[in-house]
Amino acid sequence: MPRPHAPGPEAEPLLVDAETDLRPTPEVAAARRTLRAHPALLLIGIVLASLNMRAALAGVSPLLGEISGHFGLSATMSSLVTTIPLIFMGLASPFAPRLARRWGTEAVLLSALALLIGGILLRVAPPVMALFAGGALVGSGIAFLNVLMPGLVKRDFPHRAAGMTALYTTSMIGGATVSAASAVPLENALGGWRGSLASWSLLAVVAALVWIPQTVLARRGTHHGEPAATPVRTTPDAGPRLSRSPLAWQVTLFMGLQSSIAYVCIAWLPTIFTDHGMSKNTAGLVFAFSTMLQMVGSFVVPTLAGRMRSQRTLAVAVAALMGAGIAGLLVAPVAGAWVWATLIGVGQGGAVGLALTMMVLRTGDAHTSARLSGMAQTWGYLLAAVGPLALGVVHQTIGGWGLPLTLMLAVCGVLAVLGLGAGRDRKIRS
């Protein structure tokens, strides 16, 4: 059998396609054609929804010290503020495609934004339990956006999927960058951390308002209780059994460990800087700078990966960049902060881009790619949730950052080893 070539730029990776194995009803298909006749509305909706996919998480990190001090939280309990959303991002992800099959992608996406709004506002309610319950709603809403957005792009822009994927990814990172950079100024302007966190509900409200007419158009022609699509008769278990594939698990664990490093930085990087004497405002700016530079890695690395038969070198390179930045935090956390932020940011962006790319390169068809993406995203976020919590426990136990950062260096080493396996020029086969 001839060996398939690696996909080019137009085959860049997507996450779970919510329309997989579905055929829209004729009425819904007509409604979607109406939507596509207004590409500007779709484009604005995609950008606004994407801006919300990280903003509500990134804005918490620079304020974590104030939140912990207000409620008297220990380091372990503080880590739950960022860990609980990750747990629910993993738990909620498998439900998004099922809901989209039943109610339509647009309706579930609008509901995800409503869930996000509710979670953001609940998170700033007085009881401490509301902080954690709101985080669970925020994580669930973001999970639905994570799963549905790539499928929506693939469905409505099939000939510009690569460009649109780059647009929504850049918007996602841009939202996180602005959120991190403005968290402390908004805190000062709005009278406290609650005002800063609550302000991001306005962005989600604006996005929801744009998606309301699109949801109405997409649902037009369906009767109450009818699904928005009908299943195509396929064998549910067709294709390779991913749970028995070492290559599938290497890709999944690569996704999970790079996500763990990323969310450890979201949770603790500003705190590491402030604990070593940096001002809160400067720490927020350095963190935002690192987040912004992820756009460089997330654009360059997948572009290179699509042109290479093996991605092992790239996998080791992104792990080494993050490792170098973390090692710098051990040696001179404040003096070299901007340098370490650069290395970590570019490495993180490249790692997530490579993880998504390998979900396509390691599979031979779109159906298996979607299944692998779902597996990697569900288990990846659950694994990522362990990182911030574990480092919080270690930090609380020893009272310093030396051992937690050393453990992160070890994770970077494991990530490089997994990349050597996941980056091989192989396909997952039956």
Image (cartoon, rainbow, N blue to C red):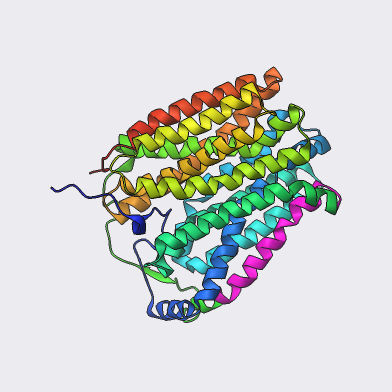
In this view, the residue farthest toward the right is: 191
Closer to us: 214 or 188: 188
Left or right: where 316 falls relative to 6:
right
Closer to us: 319 or 213: 319
Query: Main structural element of the magenta stretch: helix, strand or loop?
Result: helix
In this view, the residue farthest toward the top is: 398
Residue at (72, 38) in percent of width and height: 283
Residue at (66, 61) in percent of width and height: 204
Left or right: where 418 falls relative to 50:
left
Q: Position of residue 343 (x, y in %)?
A: 55, 35
Q: Is residue 70 above or below residue 412?
A: below
Q: Position of residue 166 (x, y in %)?
A: 47, 57
Q: Is residue 390 visible?
A: yes
Q: Position of residue 423 (x, y in %)?
A: 34, 37
Closer to us: 161 or 286: 286
Q: Position of residue 89 (x, y in %)?
A: 55, 47
User: Does residue 339 belong to the magenta stretch?
Assistant: no
Residue at (74, 26) in percent of width and height: 276
Question: Over which residues does the magenta segment extend?
Answer: 190-215
Quarter residue 243 falls in: top left
Q: Is residue 211 above or below residue 335?
A: below
Left or right: where 289 falls relative to 149:
right
Quarter residue 430 falls in: top left
User: Does residue 196 belong to the magenta stretch?
Assistant: yes
In this view, the residue farthest toward the left is: 1
Q: Is residue 73 above or below residue 235?
A: above
